[in-house]
Amino acid sequence: MKKEEIKIIAKSKNELASDVRVGDDKYLILTEKGGPKTPYIITRIYLKGKILSTMKTDYKDMISDPDIESRVTEFMRRQHLSAISMFTSEKKKGEKTPSDYLEDVKILLRRKSQKNALELLKESLEQYPDDPFLLSYYGCLEAIVNKNYRFGIDTCNRAIEALKRNVPIGERFLYPVFYLNLGRAYLATGKKKNAIEAFNTGLLMNREDSELVAELKRLGIRKKPAVPFLSRSNPINKYIGTLLHKLRG
C-alpha cells in the first residue's frame, strides 16, 4: 500500500488547496468558489501542473439563502475533503486506478475506438468490479458494440444505484454522465422515448451539460422554455431566454 501524506496549503472563503503526496508523486487538489454570475464550486486535481480530473457543482439553489456564505463555504469544504478521500482511496488500490482506466477509455472513445474501449473496460472491471463509473461505460458499450441491449441497460442502471450508495448526498455533479450512458444504451436499443427521459434526468443535475444537450438536439428535442405554460415564441419567454443567455455569457 502506498504511503500518503496530506497537507492543507491554502484556506479561505473562496479557495481550499491541499498537497497530497502518494508514494513519490505530489498532487495538488484545489477547490474554488465562483461568484454570483458563475455559481459553481470546482475541484481540480493536478500533477506537475497538468489537470488530471475536475469536479463541478452548481450552488444556484443557495443564491437566495440569507446564510449563503456559511452554507457555500461548508459545501466547498465537504467537496474538497470528498475529492481527497476518493482520490487517495483509488491510489491505495493499485498502480492503475479506476480514474486511470476511465481516462484511457475516454481517449479511445474520442478516437472512435469503441471495441478497444470495451475491452479495456472488461480488464478494469476484473480489478474494480463495483466501480460505478466503469460499470456505466461498460453497460453503454455492451449495448452499442455487442448489442447486448438488456444487459447493457441493466448494467447502466446498476451503476446509477451503486453511485447513489457510495457518493455523499448532494454531490450531483457526478450524475449527468451516468444518464448520458444510460440514454445512449437506450438509443442503441431503439427506445427513443426512454433515451430522452434519461437525457432529461441528467439535465436536472446540470442543465448546461454539453453532451446531454447535444444528444437531445440530435433527436430533435429543444430545451423547455423558461416559462413552460407559455409558448416558446411568447415575448416573456424570449426576454427571459435572452437574459439568461447574457448572464451565462
Image (cartoon, rainbow, N blue to C red):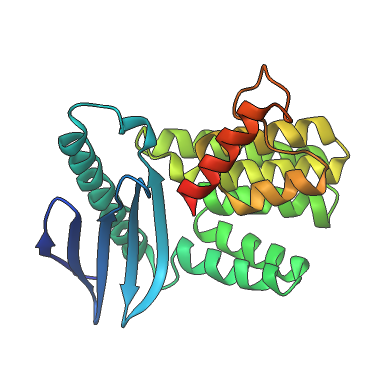
Residue furthest to the front: 235
Give the image location of residue 91, x and y in percent: 34, 65
Q: Is residue 105 above or below residue 197?
A: below
- Quarter holding residue 78: top left
Could you tell me which residue is drawn at 47 percent across and 61 percent down?
A: 98
Could you tell me which residue is drawn at 23 percent across and 50 percent down?
A: 81
Q: Which of 150 and 180 is in front in this view?
A: 180
Q: In this view, does 188 lie above or below 112?
A: above
Give the image location of residue 148, x and y in percent: 82, 46
Q: In the figure, is residue 228 to the left or right of 192?
A: left
Give the image location of residue 186, x and y in percent: 78, 39
Could you tell me which residue is drawn at 54 percent across and 51 percent down?
A: 133
Residue furthest to the top: 229
Q: Nearer the viewer, residue 204 or 128?
A: 204
The answer to whether one can see residue 162 in this image is yes
- Quarter holding residue 2: bottom left
How many numbered marks are there? Answer: 0
The answer to whether one can see residue 207 in this image is no
- Quarter holding residue 58: top left
On-image quarter of the N terminus: bottom left
Q: In this view, does 166 lie above or below 129?
A: above
